[in-house]
Image (tube, grey):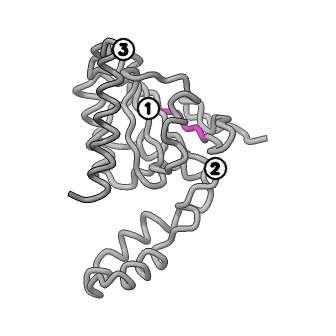
Amino acid sequence: MSELTRQILKANKSFVKQSLSQGGFDEVSKYPSRNLAVLTCMDTRLLNFLEPAMGIARGEAKLIKVAGNTAFEDFDSVIGSLMVAVYELHVHDIIVMGHDDCGMLKTTADSLCRHMAEEGIDEKAIAAVRPKLEQWADPITDIDASVCDTVRRLRANPYLPSSLTIYGMVIHPHTGEIRVVDDGEGQEQEVL
């Protein structure tokens, strides 16, 4: 058994023991009580930080985390996850939540391909994925603009209903302060 597995199982045993000693957890529905999905970044600084900053508790929203909080294809795993949230789990509102100091601002197709080559990934595989990486990583140069672009793409997506309200917001990863960059009505907010 790996050290990581041992650490996780040890933490889990302690977690379960503490939970049971306090009467266990209340049952929570798989349906988000606020009919909300949040598409956000996988940044470690947002873990156990984003939800309280937004006033979201366990059972209230679906969280979808991907690098750069983007959805750039008509159908990919992000869109598929949002489709499940909307059509199966009754989500009516989506918030695209970016964050300041996002690592994707410095990530490029070139940097990813270089690191892939350093790790021994086959040159043909790198060449095959490079165009997708250029489409995905290279356009992210301004977080507010990137969030607004993702909001526009979701609104225009042929697989998501026009009845959804889709918002764009950005959180500061150190202070937790949130600013609105799209108010859900297609109005991009002036950043002061």
* Picture layout, residue 165 above or below residue 83: above
Give the residue displayed 30% in from the left and 16% down from the top: 24
Is residue 60 left or right of 141 when viewed as pictured? left
Q: Which amino acid does label 1 sit on?
A: Ile
Q: Which amino acid does label 2 sit on?
A: Asp
Q: Residue furthest bottom?
A: 123
Give the residue displayed 44% in from the left and 35% down from the top: 38
Q: Earlier in the sequence, mark 1 or mark 3?
A: 3
* Picture layout, residue 179 above or below residue 129: above
Q: Mark 1 — residue?
A: 94
x, y (%) of residue 167? 52, 33
What range is drawn magenta here?
A: 166-170
Give the residue displayed 37% in from the left and 84% down from the top: 117
Q: Nearer the viewer, mark 1 or mark 2?
A: 2
Is residue 31 left or right of 187 when viewed as pictured? left
Gap between marks 1 and 2 measured at Cα: 20 Å
Q: Which mark is residue 71?
A: none
